[in-house]
Image (cartoon, grey):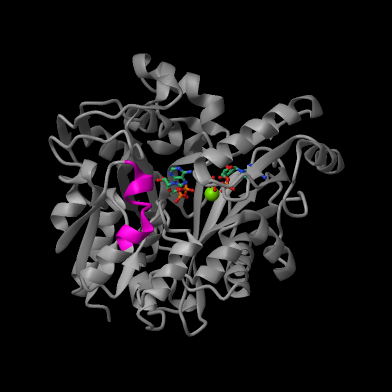
Amino acid sequence: MFKRILIANRGEIAVRIIRACRELGIETVAVYSTADASALHVQLATKAVCIGPAKAAQSYLNQTAILTAAVESGCEAIHPGYGFLSENYEFADLCAQCGLKFIGPSGDVIRKMGNKTAARELMIKAGVPVVPGSDGVIESAEEALKVAERIGYPVLLKASAGGGGRGMRRVFSPEELPATFASAQAEAVACFGNGEMYLEKLVLSPRHIEFQIMADQQGHVVHLGERDCSIQRKNQKLMEESPSKALSPELRQAMGRDAVKAAQSCGYEGAGTIEFVLDPDGNYYFIEMNTRIQVEHPVTEMVTGQDLVKEQIRVAAGLPLSFTQEDVKLNGHAIEVRINAEDPARNFAPMPGKTEFVHFPGGCGVRVDSALYNGYELSPFYDSMVAKLIVHAPTRLAAIRRMRRVLEEFIVEGYPTGAELAHLILYHPDYLKGDYNTSFIENNLDEVLSWMEKGAPLADEEER
Ligand code: ADP
Ligand code: ADP
Ligand code: MG
């Protein structure tokens, strides 16, 4: 096992990784930008190294500074968390060249699966269903028009290097395609330094269903069930749950089998997520693989009882998976709410500020993953997510009720968050029925926001 690991990230995920390392008896080296000198991950790590100024490009994305810190502090491995360098194949290659174990798949695997058009082609070969779309990259708006004509409108323009819902645009008619192509491509260049675009059929009223997989260096691949992440804003997830109300045991088995097949087809190692969209008729299509730990991994940990970050580290150290497919049982129900410093009433605009006061919920079946503390100043340079509230209960309804209670207990002062919106969503009749798709927030936002003044409707019979 490793003796010392560098964590190339910040915020709650850096804290999450430090917790796993402590329990494994591994020392941690935190890296931080000048804006993060008093951040929690810096205080909790065994040692901390400043790697540059606030701008991520000069600190958390500064590969040379991070590799130097790892080598000079005697680390054997680097955990990249999510975001930042976690899906950067050059960084994974450089780690290997420096004799450091990148905790994740090899650079070659990221090259294949981290690029969405390359991953699509690989999945077609492996026999995993993909959304009808372009054969590889689209070079121009003219070519996009031809492909869209062939597959039929509406379509979704997507960036090959996309992530976090960026570089993605819906197109409903040929007239709007050229301008939309240009703006999506410009966003892709600005966000990812890569303007490669492709096109998919827009699946209508879909659910976002993803499967967690874990693979070891011995070739074992296991899936740990699904997460339903259909409650989204701006194509970004806000609330996740496991298991999904939309999957029958048969559908779960079929999708899980395809997720495992997807990971096997590329020689995968470590934790990964296979994302699908599921249409109202029960057809599912691969959309992308995230070759890293996912923000919402705790819901899977709650229902399976496995520690995915520890398992990532064990597997990276060359140990075989500590469980088999037969060992994985989904127990009860888990829900996560992401708390972002943002204003839902103003199109979810990020609202950083100083944390004047924070109180975390607790009690039975509650988990809080956060790097917040009283007095902590949010930096406008980074992600607006400040906490993840997670609950676990025997049934879905009990989990919903527990999450309402958790959101009532949670206090944060100094900036607005989406906590109240999430609380109200937990009273929405369609959410209660589990009958929702990725347009839920778009379709119900005004109604739910109006409840902020007059209160949520009375809970239905099923609840009493
Ligand atoms: P997940 O399913 O894990 O939420 P996302 O693709 O939404 O996957 O990205 C996870 C995290 O990675 C985000 O919360 C964000 O911190 C970071 N991230 C991903 N892509 C970007 C991007 N283009 N710009 C900024 N942050 C990003
Ligand atoms: P990102 O890398 O930004 O997470 P994804 O490819 O995972 O990009 O797509 C983000 C979200 O956009 C999905 O969760 C889903 O809600 C929606 N989406 C993606 N592809 C399609 C599609 N072909 N049809 C309908 N919705 C889609
Ligand atoms: Mg995605």
Q: Nearer the viewer, residue 258 or 65?
A: 65
Image location of residue 138, percent across then percent down: 74, 46
Residue at x-position 31% and y-position 54% = 9
Image location of residue 437, percent across then percent down: 58, 39
Image location of residue 173, percent across then percent down: 78, 28
Q: Magenta span covers which residues?
A: 55-66
Q: Is residue 389 visible?
A: yes
Quadrant of the rendered image containing residue 318: bottom left
Q: Is residue 243 magenta?
A: no
Quadrant of the rendered image containing residue 166: top right
Image location of residue 201, percent across then percent down: 74, 43
Residue at x-position 33% and y-position 53% = 392
Q: How many marks?
A: 0
Q: Is residue 247 left or right of residue 300?
A: right
Q: Is residue 104 visible?
A: no
Q: Is residue 410 left or right of residue 211?
A: left
Quadrant of the rendered image containing residue 251: bottom right
Q: Nearer the viewer, residue 87 or 422?
A: 87
Give the quadrant of the C terminus: top left
Residue at x-position 68% and y-position 66% = 122
Q: Nearer the viewer, residue 126 or 36?
A: 36
Residue at x-position 15% and y-position 62% = 47
Check the image and report above or below for 338 versus 172: below
Give the quadrant of the N terminus: bottom left
Check the image and report above or below for 164 versus 408: below
Check the image and report above or below for 289 versus 327: above
Q: Is residue 64 magenta?
A: yes
Check the image and report above or below for 46 versus 172: below
